[in-house]
C-alpha cells in the first residue's frame, strides 16, 4: 500500500474517532449512531476512490517520462566510464599516471531507430569518447595530462537493417576489417587483448642515456584492419554463423572481412579474417585474422595474426598474439578471470625491429552494477640493430563502470 | 633487376608465408568446427563495444530509453 493510501485510511479512522468522541453517547439513540457511522463510511469510500484515481494518474505520468508507448521507434542512451592508475618504468624513468584506459575508453552512445515494417529497421548511431590522459597518449615527457579534453568521434552513422538482405551503413564507423584481429571470448579485453598497445602505448623506451626512444605504439600494431573511418559498408545476413562485410572508405581504400560465431554444445567459437587495401592513401595492404575458443569449464584460448605489405621495399611487418585464460565463479558478485598473453610485432618502425610483450592479468565482474575491476602487469621488449633499449614495464589497475 | 614483389616471393620462410599460414590455420579451424553437427550460431560482440547487460544506473536494461519502446535494438 502506498504512503498516500495509508494516509487516507488514517485520516478516515481519525475522523470516526473524533466525531464519536465529540458526540455525547447519552444524547444519541442507536439509530442516530448508525446513521453517523453510515455517513462516515460513505465519506471514507469517496475519499478512497478519489485517492485511487490520483495514484493511477500519477503512475501513468511517470511511465510517459521514459516511454511513448510507440513500439516502432526508440531512442536510447548508454555509456561507460573506464578509469585507472598506471605505473610505468622504462629503466630510466618511472612514473604513476591517472589514466583513461584506451582498451575501452570512457564514452557515450545514442542509438535511434524506427521500424519501417516487420523486416526493415532504419537507425542512427552517435558514439563519442572523452579520454583525459589516455593510456594511448601519455608520455614520460609530459608535464600535464594528455588531452584533447573534448569529445572525439567514434561512430556517427546511419544504418538500414533488413533481416533478409543484411545491413547497409553510411558515415563514420567500423570498417569491414575493424575488429578482425581482436576476436576474444576470455572476458578480459578491458585490460588485455591483442591490441596490447592500448594499455600503455604512448610511453617510450629508453636506452639509458636520458633521451626518449620510440613509443610502444611506434613499434607495435595488431594490424586490425582499417579501424573506424568515413565509409559505406554492407554486412550480409548471418548464415550458419558466418557473416561477410565489405566497405569502401574515404580516400580510395577498401576492405572485406568475414566473421564466424558458433556454439558447439557449450564450446563457444568465434573467428574473423580480413583483407584491407589502403595503397591509395597509406601505401600498404594488409591481411589479418583471429580466433577464440571458450570451453564450458572456463578455459579460453585466443590467437591472432596479421601482416602488412608495404608498397616500398623492405621486410613486411608481421604480428602474432596468443592468450590463455581461466574464468570461474568464486564469489556471488560475478565471474573472476585470470589470464596470460604474449604478443610480437616485427619490422614495423624500423626493418629488423623485434618487439615482444607478455602479461599477466585478472578481471573481477560485479554484474548487478555493470562494473569490472581489473589489474594487469605487462612487460615490453624492443630489440633494434645498433641500439639497446631497456624493457618497459607497466601495471594498470582500474574499473570500467557501465552506467 | 629484381622487384620488391619478386624478392618477397623468393623468400621461402618469409614473414609473408608465416602470416599466410597462420591465417589459413585460423580459417581452417573455423570451417572444420562449422562442419560439426549440433552447432548454434553465436552472436559475437566486439571487445571494444559497450558491454551488454546491466548498468549502474540503467539497471537490467543497460540503457536509458529516452523515447519509444523498450524493445531490443537491432544493433545488440
Image (cartoon, rainbow, N blue to C red):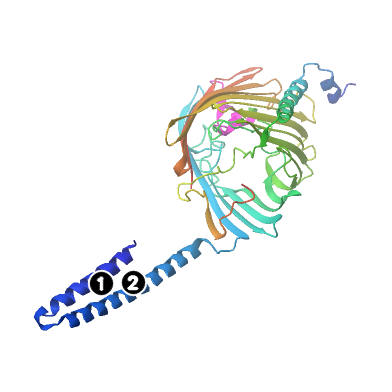
Residue position marked by numbered label 1 in the rendering: A12
Q: Is residue A80 visible?
A: yes
Q: Is residue A61 left or right of residue A317?
A: left
Residue under the point 55% across and 33% down = A187
Name which quarter of the figure residue A346 lies in.
Answer: top right
Name the one closer to the observer, A70 or A250.
A70
Residue under the point 70% across and 37% down = A241
Name which quarter of the figure residue B52 lies in.
Answer: top right
Q: Callout 2 environment at 10 Å: few (<14), some (14 to 19), or many (20+)?
A: some
Name which quarter of the figure residue B1 lies in.
Answer: top right
* Depicted A163 relative to depicted A322: above or below: below
Residue A279: x and y, percent? 79, 37
- State which region is magenta: A195-218
How many angstroms separate mark 1 from mark 2 (CA)? 9 Å
Residue A48's tag is 2
Residue under the point 64% across and 37% down = B42
Q: Secondary structure at mark 1?
A: helix
Task: Reply yes or no: does residue A390 show up in magenta.
Answer: no
For marks 1 and 2, the one nearer the N-term is 1
The answer to whether marks 1 and 2 mark residues whose Cβ atoms lie closer than 8 Å is yes
Amino acid at each position: 500500500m502506498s504512503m498516500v493510501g495509508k494516509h487516507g485510511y488514517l485520516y478516515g479512522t481519525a475522523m470516526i474517532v473524533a466525531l464519536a468522541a465529540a458526540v455525547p453517547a447519552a444524547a444519541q439513540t442507536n439509530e442516530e449512531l448508525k446513521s453517523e457511522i453510515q455517513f462516515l463510511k460513505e465519506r471514507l469510500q469517496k475519499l478512497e476512490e478519489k485517492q485511487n484515481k490520483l495514484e493511477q494518474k500519477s503512475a501513468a505520468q511517470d511511465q510517459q517520462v521514459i516511454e511513448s508507448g510507440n513500439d516502432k521507434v526508440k531512442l536510447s542512451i548508454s555509456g561507460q566510464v573506464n578509469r585507472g592508475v598506471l605505473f610505468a618504468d622504462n629503466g630510466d624513468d618511472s612514473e604513476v599516471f591517472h589514466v583513461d584506459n584506451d582498451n575501452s575508453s570512457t564514452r557515450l552512445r545514442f542509438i535511434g531507430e524506427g521500424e519501417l515494417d516487420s523486416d526493415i529497421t532504419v537507425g542512427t548511431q552517435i558514439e563519442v569518447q572523452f579520454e583525459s590522459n589516455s593510456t594511448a597518449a601519455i608520455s614520460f615527457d609530459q608535464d600535464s595530462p594528455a588531452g584533447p579534453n573534448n569529445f572525439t568521434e567514434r561512430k556517427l552513422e546511419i544504418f538500414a537493417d533488413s533481416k533478409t538482405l543484411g545491413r547497409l551503413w553510411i558515415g563514420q564507423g567500423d570498417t569491414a576489417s575493424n575488429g578482425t584481429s581482436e576476436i576474444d571470448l576470455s572476458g578480459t579485453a578491458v585490460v588485455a587483448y591483442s591490441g596490447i598497445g592500448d594499455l600503455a602505448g604512448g610511453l617510450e623506451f629508453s636506452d639509458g642515456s636520458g633521451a626518449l626512444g620510440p613509443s610502444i605504439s611506434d613499434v607495435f600494431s595488431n594490424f586490425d584492419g582499417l579501424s573506424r573511418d568515413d565509409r559505406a559498408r554492407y554486412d550480409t545476413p548471418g548464415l550458419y554463423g558466418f557473416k561477410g562485410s565489405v566497405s569502401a572508405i574515404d580516400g580510395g581504400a577498401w576492405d572485406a572481412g568475414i566473421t564466424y560465431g558458433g556454439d558447439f554444445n557449450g564450446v563457444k567459437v568465434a573467428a574473423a579474417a580480413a583483407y584491407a587495401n589502403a595503397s591509395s592513401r597509406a601505401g600498404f595492404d594488409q591481411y589479418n585474422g583471429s580466433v577464440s575458443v571458450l570451453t564450458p569449464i572456463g578455459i579460453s584460448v585466443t590467437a591472432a595474426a596479421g601482416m602488412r605489405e608495404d608498397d616500398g621495399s623492405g621486410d613486411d611487418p608481421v604480428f602474432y598474439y596468443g592468450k590463455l585464460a581461466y574464468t570461474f565463479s568464486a564469489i556471488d558478485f560475478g565471474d573472476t578471470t585470470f589470464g596470460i598473453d604474449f604478443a610480437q610485432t616485427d619490422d614495423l618502425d624500423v626493418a629488423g625491429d623485434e618487439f615482444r610483450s607478455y602479461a599477466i592479468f585478472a578481471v573481477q565482474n560485479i554484474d548487478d552494477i555493470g562494473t569490472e575491476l581489473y589489474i594487469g602487469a605487462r612487460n615490453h621488449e624492443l630489440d633494434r640493430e645498433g641500439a639497446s633499449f631497456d624493457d618497459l614495464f607497466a601495471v594498470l589497475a582500474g574499473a570500467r563502470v557501465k552506467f | 633487376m629484381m622487384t620488391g614483389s619478386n624478392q618477397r616471393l623468393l623468400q621461402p620462410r618469409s614473414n609473408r608465408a608465416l602470416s599466410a599460414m597462420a591465417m589459413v590455420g585460423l580459417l581452417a579451424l573455423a570451417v572444420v568446427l562449422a562442419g560439426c553437427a549440433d552447432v548454434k550460431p553465436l552472436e559475437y560482440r566486439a571487445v571494444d563495444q559497450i558491454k551488454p547487460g546491466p548498468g549502474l544506473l540503467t539497471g537490467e536494461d543497460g540503457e536509458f530509453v529516452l523515447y519509444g519502446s523498450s524493445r531490443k535494438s537491432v544493433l545488440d
